[in-house]
Amino acid sequence: MSSVLYDTPGPRAKRRNVLFTVVFAVLLLLLLWWVWLKMDEKELWASAQWKPFTESQAWTTYLLPGLADTLKAAALAMVIALPLGAVFGITRLSDHRWVRGASGTVVEFFRAIPVLLLMLFANELYARYTDVGSEERPLYAVVTGLVLYNSAVLAEVVKAGILALPKGQTEAAYAIGLRKGQTMSSVLLPQAVTAMLPAIVSQLVVIVKDTALGGVMIGFTELLNSRGTLAANYANQIPSFIVVAIMFIVLNFILTSFASWLERRLRRSKRSTGAVLGAEDIDDLNAAEVGGAHGTGAVGKT
Amino acid sequence: MFDFLEGYDVLGAFWMTVKLTALSAVGSLIWGTLLAAMRVSPVPLMRGFGTAYVNIVRNIPLTVIILFCSLGLADVFGVTMGSEDFKIQGFRLAVLGLVAYTAAFVCEALRSGMNTVPLGQAEAARAIGLSFTQTLWLVVLPQAFRSVIGPLANVLIALTKNTTVAAAIGVAEAAYLMKTMIENEAQTLLIGAVFAFGFVVLTLPTGLILGWLSKRLAVKR
C-alpha cells in the first residue's frame, strides 16, 4: 500500500522526507527526554528501584508465581471453552430451528456481556451457593468468566470454520452412507479445527490479557496482582509496571508469532482445503457482532 | 421484585458508561486515524513508530494500561489531567487509557480498509498531481472509512464492554456499581440480569445500526 500512495521520491520529496523525519525525531526525543526528566526527578533511575529485578527473590516470590497463575487460568479457560465452543458452533448450524435459535441466543448473549461482569457475578455466585474455598474462588470465577465469553467467541470461529469447507465434502460423506453425526465428527470437524488453529491460538492472547481483570477486581493472584504486592514491598511502582508490561508483551508476542507461523504453514500444506481462519478473522469476531451484519472474512453469508 | 434497585443510581452508572464510551470513541478515532496515516506515510521513522505503537499496545492488557494511568501517571508522575478532583481525574485518566488502547485497533481496522481501495485510484490521484496528503485525505481515507464501518462497529462494541475496566480505578460506572450492589444485596441473580440487560441494550442497537450503515455505505465494487 505504502508504495502506491507516493512515488519514488525525487530530490524535493527526499528533502521534505528528511525534514519530516527530523521534526518527528525531535518531537519523539522531546517526549522521551520529558519522561526521562520526570523519572529522574522522582529518582526512578536509582538502583534501588530496579535492583529487585536483578535478584532472584523478586522473581521467585512474586513475578513467576503470578505468571504461573495467569498461564494456569488461561490454559484452563481454553481447554474448557474449546469443546463448549465446538458444541455451540455445531448446534448453531443445526437443522432444527429451536436448537439453532437457542444456541444462537446463548452465544449472542455472552458476547454482549463484558467479561468483567461475568467474573464478578461468578465470584459472588460461588461465594454464596457453593462451598468452594475462598482460596480457590478467584481462580474459579476468572475461569468461569473467561469460559463463558470465549466459548461464545469460539462457537463463531467453529461455525465459520465449518462453513468455510467446500460443500462437496458433506455431499461426499452422505454419498458413502455416513449419517449426519458421523459426517460432522469424522469429516467436517477435524478439518475445521485444523483451519481454525491459528484463530484459536490468537484467541489465547485475548484470554491471557483478560486474566488481568481478575487480578484487580476479585483478587486473583495473577501477574498484575503480584505486581501490586511487589511494588508495595520494594516501593517501585513504575519499574514494576514496566517489567510486567514487558512480560505480557513478550508472552503475547510469542503467541501471535506462533499463530501466524501456523497460518502460513497451514496455507502451504497440500492436504488442507485451503480454508484457513487467521488471526485477522478473529479480531472481527471478538466484539459482539450482533445480527451477523457482515461476513467473517474467510466465509461469505450463511 | 425490583425494590433492591432503590438507593442505587443504576441509570447514573450506565450514563457514566455511555460517557466513557463516547469520549473514548471520539478520541481513539482521531488518534487511530493519525496512527494509520503514520503507518502508510513515506517517512520510515513515522512508519516504525506506528508499527511499534500498535504491536506494543495491543499486547498489553487494558487493565495494566488503565491501572498504570492511575497508579503510575497520576500518583508518581503527577499527571492531573487538569483537575484536582479525584473523581474527575479518575474519569479522565480512564478515557486516556481507553483511547491509547482502542486507537491501536482503530488503526488496524483503517489500514485494512485502505487495502480495499484499488491501486489504480491512488495511481490516478497521483497522476493528476495530488500530493501524498491529498491522496490520502481526499481519495483513500473517505473510501477506507466507508468500508470499515463494520469492523469499526466491532471496535466500538468492544470499547463499550471495555469501559467496565475503569471500575478498577474507581470510576463509578456500571461494573463498579454492580460490584457494590452484589456485595450488599441478596438478589445476586437479579442484579446480574439487570446489568447484563443494560449492556445488551447498549450494544445491540449499536451493532444493528452500524451494521445497516455499513451495508448501505459500503462502496460497491
Image (cartoon, coloured by chain):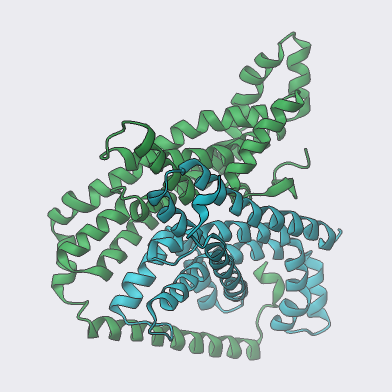
Chain colours: A green, B cyan
Residue found at x 13% / y 54% = A57
Horizontal relation, residue A222 to residue A102: left or right: left
Which picture quadrant has residue B64?
bottom left
Residue found at x 23% / y 85% = A41
Look at the image and tell me whether residue A122 can be seen.
yes
Residue found at x 25% / y 69% = A237
B133 over A234 or under it: above or below = below
Horizontal relation, residue B212 to residue B83: left or right: right
Q: Quadrant of the C terminus of chain B?
A: bottom right
A224, A11: nearer the viewer: A224
Where is residue A222? Give x, y as percent: 31, 49
Where is residue A165? Give x, y as percent: 71, 31
Where is residue A120? Give x, y as percent: 42, 47
Horizontal relation, residue B103 to residue A188: left or right: left
B117, A93: nearer the viewer: A93
A199, A114: nearer the viewer: A114
Q: Quadrant of the N terminus of chain B?
A: top right
A252 over A47 or under it: above or below = above
Where is residue B215? Give x, y as percent: 81, 56
Look at the image and tell me whether residue A162 can be seen.
no
